[in-house]
Amino acid sequence: MGQRGRSSRREGGRNGLSVVLDLSGAEELCSEPAPLERVRRAYADLEPNSRLEVRTPIAEHAFAVRAWSRKTGIIIVEDVTESGVTRLVLERGA
């Protein structure tokens, strides 16, 4: 099963480690946890001063991440949609 639906880690920026969570295949993988639950788990595993980048082509996923972030006080530092894919970058403070 390639990279589809998996998260990967990469170094980046002055804010330290950034984790990328690609939800592109989330609706195709019945055995996977719900997309928002995957975002919650990935965010909970972040180191202080790190970022979680969520990528999704599904508008409902982006809406759910935005709503959850507002509700829990998580800062979204980037919210961009290009070529039908939304990229949300959530920042975890110190």
Image (tube, helix red, strand yellow):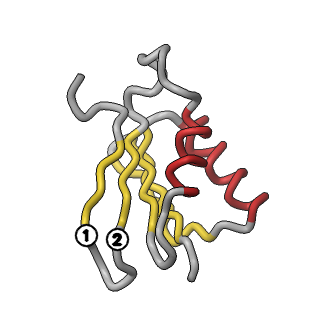
User: Residue 27, image x and y in percent?
Assistant: 48, 21
Q: Is residue 24 left or right of residue 72?
A: left
Task: Identify the residue at horizontal 48%, vertical 78% (top origin).
Answer: 49
Residue 88 rendering spot, x and y as whole percentages: 48, 57
Coordinates of residue 68 in the picture (x, y in percent): 71, 51
Which kind of residue does numbered mark 2 sit on? Leu
* Residue at 37% from the left image edge and 42% from the top image edge: 22
Q: What is the total number of numbered labels drawn onto the structure image?
A: 2
The disc, 1 or 2, on the residue closer to the chain's N-terminal end is 1
Which element type, helix, strand or loop, lies under badge 1? loop
Q: CA distance from mark 1 to mark 2?
A: 5 Å
Residue behind mark 1: 11
Mark carried by residue 17 = 2
Q: Judge the density around disc 2: few (<14), some (14-19), many (≥20) Cα neighbours within 10 Å.
A: some
Give the residue displayed 54% in from the left and 56% down from the top.
Answer: 43
Q: Is residue 2 above or below residue 65?
A: above
Query: In what element is the residue under mark 2?
Result: loop
Q: Is residue 69 above or below residue 64?
A: below
Circles 1 and 2 in contact, beta carbons < 8 Å: yes
Q: Quadrant of residue 17?
A: bottom left
